[in-house]
Image: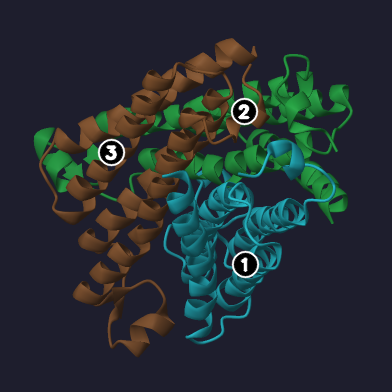
Chain colours: A green, B cyan, C brown
Amino acid sequence: MVDFSDLVSNDNVVFKSYVFWSTILIVKTLFMAFLTARQRFKNKTFANPEDAGKYKAKVKYDDPDVERVRRAHRNDLENIFPFIFVGFFYVLTNPEAALAINLFRAAAIARIVHTLVYAVVVVPQPARGLAFFVCLGSTLYMAFKCICFFL
Amino acid sequence: MVDFSDLVSNDNVVFKSYVFWSTILIVKTLFMAFLTARQRFKNKTFANPEDAGKYKAKVKYDDPDVERVRRAHRNDLENIFPFIFVGFFYVLTNPEAALAINLFRAAAIARIVHTLVYAVVVVPQPARGLAFFVCLGSTLYMAFKCICFFL
Amino acid sequence: MVDFSDLVSNDNVVFKSYVFWSTILIVKTLFMAFLTARQRFKNKTFANPEDAGKYKAKVKYDDPDVERVRRAHRNDLENIFPFIFVGFFYVLTNPEAALAINLFRAAAIARIVHTLVYAVVVVPQPARGLAFFVCLGSTLYMAFKCICFFL
């Protein structure tokens, strides 16, 4: 098993790539709050009466544009956090560097594409489905490797 | 405090157990997406108009079967991710191995049972409540130990 | 880069502070379930028919008091988990101790305030917005540092 001391040395390119892409995905997830806010202001739809009152808007839980961004955001929580957890364990299995780095890269880019086609420009299927499955496949592959390794 | 180098050595049974059960729970959480999809196809109810159009289904946010699985999924995010975070910190407190491993095992099995009785076969209460509290109790116990240790 | 072996030594005050505040925030997040339950019993509104039947209550997905607590809870998942992920990576960049500890402390206290003003006593804006942005700003600052460091 890879030693944690090696892990955090400047030479461990797998761990560096893992932290880099995980942080990019976290920042992306955090920015979903602004995409939601943009839709709330555009459609004058808020979930809290105190916000709606302030902006002379209505309280509504089912505005299609707002809910679309919120579903994209929730989908991030459901998929990006598992990717980050499992990616950390996977780094500890001392994987082949090129494979591991490409898995992280593919998953991260797929999640960025997922947001774009789901909540920004709304591209027809199968764009969203494909982006979803690239990250899911990457995470499940890493999970499988971890389960075998840590059994 | 346990040294990270010990942590990732093959002999650290606590850390191995932690990673194993955490990964199992992550995979379980990821599979909730398929349980939701199954209900969406069964009840022909989708949240996105582009999906509904493709499968000649309706757009609806409150189908009881779909929402049940989505609540189970959200409950996973609310409880499994905290378990994985706190479990990692708890491993660092160098806990007694048998206790720690049984805490991980109990929490993980409880969450699997939670999904079964909530979103798969729908068993009457208190099955769901008991499964919920076993994982919550395990996480809160570990959190208490961590707060004392890292204070 | 900081060595993991240093990280978990008793002298690393940054890591200790990180674990302490992260655990506090996880416990806070877990307790949101009880705040939701309190509103469900008060307003006799449940999401599952088996729960509603047991307490002679109604099944409803849009009770304003229940949904307010659930939004606060979801906001925790969206912001506290990213804080914990990025905080861990940030500790590895060997940050200046006083700055790092105050970032953790500010973010954690802000999230506790967020819950109080959103879901417990309902204080008018900008209380909730300010609390939200303190944690978000802290996380984004740490993320920026991590991206530069691990690039």
Residue at left 40%, top 54%?
A: C27
Q: Quadrant of the C terminus of chain A?
A: bottom right
Q: Label 1 crowding class (10 Å Cα cut-off): few <14, some 14-19, many 20+? A: many
Badges 3 and 2, same chain: yes
Badges 3 and 1, same chain: no
Foreground: B140 or C11? C11
The residue to which callout 1 is attached is: B103
- Vertical placement of residue A107 versus B133, above or below: above
Q: Quadrant of the N terminus of chain A?
A: top right
The residue to which callout 3 is attached is: C109
The residue to which callout 2 is attached is: C6
Whether pointer 3 and pointer 1 mark residues with C-beta atoms closer than 8 Å, the reply is no
> Residue C21: x, y in percent?
40, 41
> Residue B43: x, y in percent?
57, 67
Foreground: B106 or B45? B106
Chain letter for mark 2: C
Element type at mark 1:
helix
Give the spatial CA distance, label 3 vs label 1. 29 Å
Q: Is residue C32 left or right of residue C125?
A: right
